[in-house]
Image (cartoon, coloured by chain):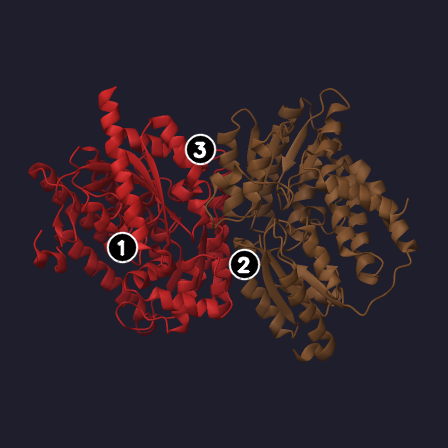
Amino acid sequence: MSTAEIIARCEELYEDTTFAASRAWKEAEPGRKVIGFMPVYIPEEIIHAAGMLPLGILGGGDELEVIHGDAFYQSYICRIPRSTIELGLTGRLDFVDGMLFPSICDVIRNLSGMWKLMKPGIYAKYFDVPQNYRDDIGGKYYQQEMQELRHDMEKISGRKITDEAISNSIKIYNEHRQLVRDVYALRSAEPWKVPSSEVYLLMRAGMVLPVEEHIPMMQAYIAAAQEEDRPMRDNCRVITTGAFCEQPPLNLIKSIEMSGCYVVDDDYMMVNRWLMEEVPTEGDPIKNLADAFLHHSADSSAKYSDTQEKVGQYLYDSVQKNKAEGVIFAAPSFCDPALLERPLLAAKMAENKVPHISFKYAENSGQMQPIREQTGTFADSIKLWGKEI
Amino acid sequence: MSANAQTEVIKDLSMLKQKEMIARNYDAITSAPETGQKVASTFVPGNLNELINSFGMLNNLPEINAINNGMRKQSGAMIMDAERSGHSEDVCTYVKADIGMMSKGNIAPNGKPMPAPDLLLLSYTGCFTFMKWFELLRKEYNCETVMLQVPYTGDGVVTDNMRDFVVKQLKEEVIPTLERVSGNKFDIDRLRENLARSAKAEDDLVWVLDSAKKVRSPIDAYFGGVYYIGPIFTAFRGTQDAIEYYQLLRAEIEKRMEAGLGPITPEGDMGEEKYRLVVEGPPNWTSFREFWKMFYDEGAVVVSSTYTKVGGVYDQGFRHDPENPLESLADYCLGCYTNRNMPSRVDMIENYMNDFQADGLLINSIKSCNSFSAGQLMMMNEIEKRTGKPGAFIETDLVDPRYFSAANVKNRLESYFQMVDQKRQSSRQF
C-alpha cells in the first residue's frame, strides 16, 4: 500500500465528524462499548483491557459548523469545548458510552460537569493525574484513581478487568507507542519523506481506530514512506509546540511546511507518546502505569515542573535531539496552559539561542496567508542568519 | 442622599478594624527583612494560614495584591507592562498584574517595597492558572517552592483517596518545607489553637452571611461581602484579630436588623430593597465603587454570592477542626467553591435562590478566570429552568480596566431589573 492510499484513508477518518469507523467497530459485535476521552492523556490500557474502544475526541475541526456550542461559552473561551458540545448535542457522540475529561485545564475540567448536566444518563468523569511525582505520594494517589477508573470501566463493560488483561493491553500499547516513536524518528531523520501533514493524519487515525488496526497502519506507512522518492528541499528544521489540546486545522500544518519548514517534532495528540518508554508487563500493571507516568512521561504545559531547571527542558532536549533550528509556538487562542507557559519556554529558548516565533490559532482558523508569511519569514531568517537571530 | 455624602465614605467600626489589621499586616510584611520574620507567598483558595502562622511566618497573597492595585487604579499599567514583556493578552490578569507589579518595584499599599518571599507555597486549589503562575514567580524570585495539589472534586464528593493525598503532602512535603524555611519545628498544639480560633470566626461569618435571608437584608453579600470575607480569606484566619473582627461585625449587623436597616454602602444606608439577587462570579475591582453604585442606586441588594465562598465554604457546615488538624485543612481545601464540580455549583446556587428568596441570578463573567467562567451560561440556564427566576449575564474582568465598560454594564443591569419587574407582574397575574 502506498503512503497516498494510507493517508487517503486517514484523511477520510479525519474528516468524518460522525465517527463512522468507531460506530462500525461498536456495531460489529453485540455488547461492544466506546469510551470517549479528551486531551491530553488517559491510560487507554484500562479501557482496552475491558474490551472497549478508547475514542479520542479532539473537537470538531474546521469542518464542523458550531451552532449550539457557541451558546454555551463566552467569546474569550477557546473553541474545543464549543465544538465538543456541538458534537454531543447533534447526536454525533450518541454511540459513546462514557466520556473522560483528563486534567489539563479549567475549561476541560468544567466541561466534565457540564457533560454530567447535559447528559445525565451517560458516564462522565474528570480524570485526575498527580502533579506530585513521588511514588509514595503522587504515585499512591494516582494508583487509586486508576483503580477507581478500572472499577467504573468494569461496570460499563460488564466485564471484570484482570491484572493479566491490563498487562496484555500494556503490551499492545507498548508496541503502538514504539511505532509512534518510529514514525516520529523517521520524520526527524528524513523529513522530506514524511510530511508533517501525513504524520498528523496518521496519528489522528489512531484516535478513532482500535489500536490493533492502527498498529498495522503505521507499519505499512513506515514501510511505504521509506520507499518514497520525494525531493529534499532547503527547508529549515523547526519544532511546533503548544497544540496539545485544541488542534490546528490541517491547512495550518500544511502551510507551515509550504512556507519552508520541516517540522521535526510537535505535540499534537500527546496521548500517543505520553509514556516515553516501554511500560513493564510483569508485576502489578496499575503500579507499572503509575511508575511510567511519574518517571517516564512526556512533559507539557499541563504538568507542573517541580524544579526551575526542568521548566522548558523537554523542549530544549527536543531541539537538540531533533537538530531543530527554531521553535514555533503555535497555541490555540485562550489556551491557559500553553499561553501561561509560553514566556517561560520562550525564555528557555532565548537563553539557549534558539530562534522562535509565536502565533495563535483556532481549530477553525481559515486565513492561512498571514501564518504562511510569518513562518516563511522565520524560515528565511534562520536560513540567512542562523543563530544570530 | 446628599451630594456631600457621595464623596464621603461612611465606615463602620468593623471596617476601621479591618483596615487597621490589613495595614498592620502589610507593615509586618514590608518590615520582614528587619524583623527576620519569614514570608510565604500563597493563594487565597486553599490557603493554609493556620499552618503558616503556626511556624511564625507571614503570608502574602498575590491575588490580594492584584486586587489592591486594581482598586487603586494601578493594575492597568502593570498588566500592559507584563504583556509588553511577552505575556499573552488572553491569560489571567491577576498573573499579569502581579508580574507587572514586580517590574514596578513590588510596592505595597504602605508605600514600602515588599520583600521577596522566602517560600512559594503553591496551594493548587480550584484553578489551573495557579500552577503556572507559581512557575513564573519561581523564575523571578528563585526561592524555595512547595506545592500542595488539591484534587478537583469532579464527581461532587471528597473521596478518602483525595483527603489522604492532601494530608500526605502536608505531612511529607509542606510541613518539612515550612520547618526548613522558618527554622521552627512543627507544633501541632499551636496549629490546633489556630484552628479553634478559625472555627469561632467562621461561626460568626456564617451568621453574618445568613442574615441576608431576612427580607430587607441588612447586608449586601457581594459588594459588602468582599469586605466581610476579607479576614477569613487572607492573613487573619486563625488569629484573635479575626475573632474580634467578626464579633464586631456581627454586633453591627444585629443592630441593623433590629433597626430594620438595609445594607451599608459607601454612601451610607441603602434605601428601599427592590431587588434581591444572587450573584455568581468575582467582582470587577478596577471600578468596584462604580459597579456597586449601579446596584444600590436601583435598590438591588445581593443576598448571596458564590465569590464569597471561593476562599472556603462555611455556610454548609464545614468548620476547621482542632481535633483533626491536617484532615480538616484537607477538607477545607477540597471544599473551596471553584474546586467543586459544575453540578454542585448549580445546586448551591439553586439553594441560595430559594433560601434567600432571590428574584434572580446575575452572573458577572470574568474574562480572566476560566475556573469560574467556563460553563456559566449553562449554569444560568439551569437555574432559570429550576427556579423559574430570570438570569442575566454581564462580562467584565478582575483587574484589567480595559474590560470594564460602565455604559454596557449599566444598560444590561437596567434591562435586567425591568425584566425582574415584568416577571413579578406576570407571576401576579397568573
* Circles 1 and 2 in contact, beta carbons < 8 Å: no
Residue B295 percent location from the top left of the image: 23, 46
Check disc 3 and report the residue beneath it: B343
Check disc 1 and report the residue beneath it: B288
* Circles 3 and 1 in contact, beta carbons < 8 Å: no
Task: Quote the CA–CA distance across marks 3 and 2.
Answer: 28 Å
Point 18% across, 37% down: residue: B274
Q: Chain of mark 1?
A: B
Q: Nearer the viewer, residue A353 or B228?
A: A353
**Tag 1: amino acid:** Phe
**Tag 3: amino acid:** Pro
Task: Quote the CA–CA distance across marks 3 and 1.
Answer: 29 Å
Same-chain check, marks 3 and 2: no
| Mark 2 residue crowding within 10 angstroms, few (<14) / some (14–19) / many (20+) | many
Same-chain check, marks 1 and 2: no
**Tag 2: amino acid:** Leu
Query: What quarter of the picture does the N terminus of chain A occupy?
Result: top right
Chain letter for brown? A
Q: Earlier in the sequence, mark 3 or mark 1?
A: 1
Task: Quote the CA–CA distance across marks 1 and 2.
Answer: 28 Å
Residue B163 relative to residue A100: left or right: left
